[in-house]
Amino acid sequence: MEKSSNKLAFEKSPYLLQHAENPVDWYPWGDKAFKKAREENKPIFLSIGYSTCHWCHVMAHESFEDPEIAKLMNEVFVSIKVDKEERPDIDKMYMTVCQLMTNSGGWPLTIIMTPDKKPFFAGTYFPKVSRFGRMGLIDLIKRVKELWSDKKDEVYKASDQITNALLDLTVENPGLKLDEKTLISAYNVLSSRFDDRNGGFGVAPKFPTPHNLLFLLRFWKRTGNRDALSMIEKTLQAMRNGGVYDHIGFGYHRYSTDAEWLVPHFEKILSDQALIANAYIEAYQATKNKIYANTAKEILTYVLRDMTSPEGGFYSAEDADSEGIEGKFYIWYKEEIEKHFDEEDASLIINLFNIEESGNYLEEATHKKTGKNILHIKNLDEDFNSKFSVIREKLFKIRGKRILPHKDDKVLTDWNGLMIATLAKVSRILDEPKYLEAAKSATEFILSKIRNPDGRLLHRFRDGKAEIEAYLDDYAFFIWGLIELYETTFETYYLKTALHLNRILIEHFWDKNIGGFYFTADDGEKLIVRTKEIYDGAIPSGNSVAMLNLLRLSYFTGNSELEEKADILSRVFAETIRTNPVAHSFLMVAVDFAVGPTYSLVITGDTGASDTSAMIKEVNKYYLPNKILIYRPTDNKSTEIDGLSNFIGWFDKINNKATAYVCVNKTCKPATTELEKMIEYLNPKWITHEKT
């Protein structure tokens, strides 16, 4: 601690701690920094990043560790470091500023602003000195110093204009209800952007964006459109074959730098693992292709092995870099394979993973092959037999002797919520208890350790301490996880907790004037704007997930007020969404549920009875995304679920057999004890789709 040269040494964020010994006099975001800026009449240098960000590391090594740069920064600025994963509210606001001012964005995010938090300059990565048309940090600091000294009035005027432009962006333009036409429009845009050759959408860099696939699965289910299913399968298979997938240790890297899914940005993020595994398991349920189920299981193997804390929560990320070089942990040389394996096994590995003497890709820096290989396969149907499993395990042990990438070991409530939802769903579909136990353990950890005594959630846990008031995403994603847990376990505790947290969310985040959820609570820190997020980027927006939660909870409980709120939410953003529906693909998942047909299924029967279990297992075989499932035990007449759901109290067994009650768009079918009839009610298009 004595070596620390700035104010970050007492923070919990791994990203802030990475900069605790910089000669730059960094402050964490807080009143002390802004008070100092006002008293010393200095502008603020705000740097936002995260601990596994490659270019954040580069800028730190080039500039923030450099005494010359530090001296300049300490003279001219009060400098603040923010971890975007800890403070997404700050990051989202100033990233919007950067996009407004530069038409681009990314991390590290660099903002220069007045002591009252109003920005007047924005950018991303800056080299130490100017080169190739890119301004260097030295020149930038000197220019800001001149402006602040000689033209401060103009600087403040510009900051007011930028702030007003930011405020204008927060004004919603409510519109008419989103409907099936919106879904068709989103499909058409995705179809036009689909890469027929490589899978995925658009060109390089190519992100997995699994919510595109979740929407397309529902569109296929709704319409029977085989092209939609083809896009899904092409993308999932190409991703699984490519270097963007870790074939040895499992899990997905952040994104592909090329269109072929070969050369990844090697960082691994928890939220990606959750969402991608979710897409694979839904694709398995829809197609029964075991490769998709195996891929989901492998992703979860990685998470449970490498990303799970002793307390049961899930860590945030693993770095792209090791020993200061991106991807060094993951690449292989041909001679390395030949050294560790006999001729037959080496030949299998070299052929299967397309390993070349000269390397199998051009390095970006040199545009030459340097003997490095990114493991990838040409055909997902390769025979992964028991012999290969032994070989893969040996490759894994060899790789494990290398220096591991840095792990960001903070536990975030929102990303944990995504992983809980996926674990519960995979457990339900594959009947794998270990995933359910992991989901329940993480849930208990959040509820016991990452919330205030008043029951409100907190955002981050690290080093034994939970801090930072929760954001919309924390509530929305965690509620999603609780809903999935209920449908997997039928333990009313999870549904009751989801409803309780949803009430808190509405009380503190709902815009009582026109609707929709703010990103921050009404009693949270006041920034220059209070924003609502609807864009579904690398992860879905909190509003998109909250809309689906509201709809599902409404169907579980019979509470129409929740459905009305979902309707209002969609209308608040309707005109924005109509202009670019594919930028809101998870919201399209919610709209698909709202448009229907939507199914309520109540199964009644004795707990643990064979006919009850058979009925539940039969439902879980089918891809039925727009249904909610309630189990009402008949061996206990005072069931707790009756108190949570206002319409099932009279549901009971017929002829002393487990019985299914199916309602479609709130119109009920005759009760049935027959599995085939239950599925027919739930899934009238299933046979058609299979033959299409």
Image: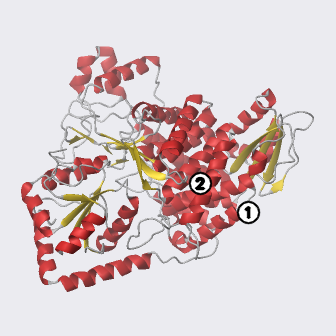
Q: Provide the residue designation for mark 2.
A: 501
Vertical side of 609 occupied by 134: above or below: below
Dots 1, 2 in contact, CB < 8 A: no
- Residue 548, visible in the rendered structure: no
- Residue 420, visible in the rendered structure: yes
The Cα–Cα distance between marks 1 and 2, rounded to whole angstroms, is 18 Å
Residue 250 position, x and y percent, is 41, 33
Left or right: residue 603 versus residue 486 is: right
Residue at horizontal 23 percent and vertical 43 percent from the top = 362
214 or 115: which is nearer to us?
115
Outermost residue toward the right in this view: 655
| Mark 1 crowdedness (10 Å alpha carbons): few <14, some 14-19, many ≥20 | some
Residue at horizontal 72 percent and vertical 45 percent from the top = 629
Residue 165 position, x and y percent, is 37, 79
The numbered mark at residue 499 is none
Residue at horizontal 72 percent and vertical 55 percent from the top = 555
Q: Nearer the viewer, mark 1 or mark 2?
A: 2
> Mark 1 is on which residue type?
Ser
| Mark 2 crowdedness (10 Å alpha carbons): few <14, some 14-19, many ≥20 | many
Mark 1 residue element: helix
Q: Provide the residue designation for mark 1.
A: 560
Mark 2 residue element: helix
Residue 275 position, x and y percent, is 49, 46
In the rendered image, the quadrant that contains the N terminus is top left
The image quadrant that residue 319 belongs to is: top left
Q: How many marks?
A: 2
Residue 182 position, x and y percent, is 60, 66
Vertical side of 491 occupied by 500: above or below: below
